[in-house]
Amino acid sequence: MIKIVKIFGNNSDISQYTVELLREKLLNSDFNVVDSNNADLIISVGGDGTFLQTLRETDFNPKPLYVGIQCGHLGFLQEINIDEIDIFIENIKNMIYNIKKMSILRTIIETKSGINQFCALNETVIREKDLKALHVNLMINDSLVEKFFGDGIIVSTPVGSTAYNLSADGSIVYPTLDVLQITHLAPINSSSYRSLNNSIIVPSEMIICLIPESDYSSDILVSVDGYSTVVPCVKKIEIVSNSNHIKSLILEKYCFWTRIQEKFL
Ligand code: NAP
């Protein structure tokens, strides 16, 4: 039963206006609206970028339900339109909704000075720090698949398959499939180098490992859900599906293919 609600917004006027409107309506319906992250439901008001930021700021908490109210640009992940707020509140009061599990990607980077870890909902993108060509060996479960040479590599979850992955010619993955997708960014194919052009889809329990060609001298740009960091002196990057999921609230009318049609076609 949902009783305690936390609302996240962004800096846009429309998000701030909607946050206030939503707070008032939730309080009038006897929900407890709190500032702490300890809530049954976390509502993100904005676009997909705001939804991703909300997850980051709440540490990808597996306990609460997450839901987005769309007042951003694309809003592929945002479940509720602004004009549906009243019916949404009625539905959560009467427990009329479904829950969708979303897997989280964990990136573990071994460097000269220790281990760095990152979580993502959409994807991890690995590039050379100055956007030069990246040389890495791609291993899946300890087997060498290819010596990649090109702009970079995206590893995406099914949720992230409609984000950067899609722009890089990766495939759309149905959200209930438990897989990871490896998509190449501008692979170089010449008489000197050969990489796969197509993306690779593997079961989520497989370990994807990227090993820079030069031990400990590679400075890597890691971008998780669009949040970028340069990690110096990288020896190994391991990307795995986290055993924890986050739970998102979806309305009963949700249809993945309708959303693909509405947002992309
Ligand atoms: P951003 O401006 O927050 O997002 C870029 C676009 O991707 C926005 O239109 C956003 O929707 C949309 N988006 C985010 N997650 C999505 C998903 N799961 N399915 C479909 N569309 C999605 O950019 P950012 O802060 O750099 O990074 C956030 C995300 O943007 C990254 O995780 C990455 O997937 C994506 N991105 C895409 C490209 C590209 O396609 N070339 C390049 C960089 C990053 P809203 O407008 O509703 O926020």
Image (cartoon, rainbow, N blue to C red):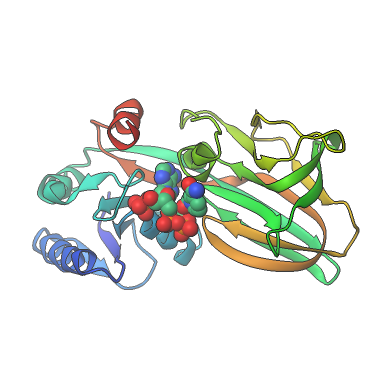
Q: Is residue 35 above or below residue 77?
A: below
The picture places residue 11, in percent across and down from the top left corner, at 29, 71
- Would you identify the image quadrant in which residue 179 lies? top right
Q: Residue furthest front?
A: 191
Quadrant of the image for the C terminus?
top left
Say left or right for 154 vs 249: right
Q: Residue at x 45, y 64 (%)?
A: 58
The picture places residue 14, in percent across and down from the top left corner, at 19, 64
The picture places residue 182, in percent across and down from the top left corner, at 65, 37
Count up the numbered dots.
0
Q: Residue at x 47, y 29 (%)?
A: 176
Q: Residue at x 16, y 67 (%)?
A: 17
Please name whichever residue, 78 or 99, is drawn nearer the observer in this view of the structure: 78
The picture places residue 190, in percent across and down from the top left corner, at 80, 35
Say left or right for 111 vs 52: right
Please name whichever residue, 265 or 239, is drawn nearer the observer in this view of the structure: 265
Q: Note whether residue 157 is visible.
A: yes
Please name whichever residue, 40 or 78, is drawn nearer the observer in this view of the structure: 78
Q: Note whether residue 247 is visible.
A: no
Say left or right for 191 vs 167: right
